Structure formats: structure tokens, C-alpha cells
């Protein structure tokens, strides 16, 4: 199973609840927001890929204080022995987009 995790500090006034859904949807993920400071996203089914390899994402944040701390976690059934997993690639894309 592939698993990646990152902590991103966002500037004050930037709410992950507003930033993440459109960004994740543009990357092909379906977004669910079960709480005020949590979010889950799932890769849409596509032909040719085993169901276990679909990427799942969990986001959790705190927006108290000067900055928002955003934890992003991605996981899938991919083999971690591969040098570059789709999980790590998605996390890199998100990290880069959120830091711009």
C-alpha cells in the first residue's frame, strides 16, 4: 500500500475549506467534507485500473492563529516498492499548487 503525508502552512486568511475542493476536483477527485476542518477525496473510477489502486486523500487543518496548518495524506493500493507512486505524484501537485 502506498502512503504519503505532508504538512503545509498556509497564510492567514487562506481557508483550506475554500481552496481544496476546486483544486481537488480539477485533479479528478470527488470531494466530501464531513466536518468543518476535515475533507476526504476519492479518485473517480476509470477503466483499466484495479479498484484497490484508486487514490484516497484525507485533509485535516487548523485555522486558528496567524497561519493554517494543513495535513494532507494520500493512500492507495499501489506497491510502495515503485520509485514514484501516483500517491506521491498527487501530493506533490497539491503541495506545489497550495504554495503558489
Image: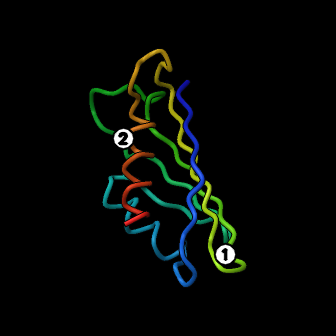
Q: Which of marks 2 and 1 is in front?
A: 1
Residue 51 is left or right of residue 34, and the answer is left
User: How far across and how far down the image is residue 10, in percent?
Assistant: 54, 70
Q: Mark 1 points at which residue?
A: 63
Residue 17 found in image quarter: bottom right
User: How far across and how far down the image is residue 46, in percent?
Assistant: 30, 38
Residue at far top of view: 81
User: How far across and how far down the image is residue 20, in percent?
Assistant: 46, 66
The N terminus lies in quadrant: top right
Viewer-nearest residue: 38 or 96 = 96
User: How far across and how far down the image is residue 21, in percent?
Assistant: 45, 67
Is the residue marked by circle 2 packed among few (<14), some (14-19), or many (20+) residues within 10 Å?
Answer: few
Residue 65 is left or right of residue 91, and the answer is right
Q: Is residue 6 above or below residue 54?
A: below
Are the residues at dot 2 and dot 1 in contact (C-beta closer than 8 Å)?
no
Residue at image point 36% right, 50% down: 93
Say which mark, if any, is on residue 45: 2
Amino acid at each position: 500500500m502506498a502512503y504519503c503525508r505532508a504538512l503545509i502552512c498556509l497564510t492567514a486568511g487562506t481557508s483550506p475549506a475554500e481552496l481544496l475542493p476546486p483544486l481537488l476536483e480539477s485533479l479528478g477527485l470527488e470531494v466530501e467534507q464531513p466536518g468543518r476542518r476535515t475533507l476526504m477525496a476519492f479518485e473517480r473510477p476509470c477503466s483499466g485500473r484495479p479498484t484497490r489502486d484508486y487514490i484516497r486523500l484525507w485533509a485535516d487543518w487548523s485555522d486558528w492563529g496567524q497561519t493554517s496548518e494543513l495535513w494532507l495524506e494520500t493512500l492507495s493500493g499501489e506497491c510502495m516498492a515503485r520509485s514514484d507512486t501516483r500517491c506521491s505524484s498527487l501530493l506533490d501537485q497539491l503541495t506545489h499548487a497550495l504554495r503558489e
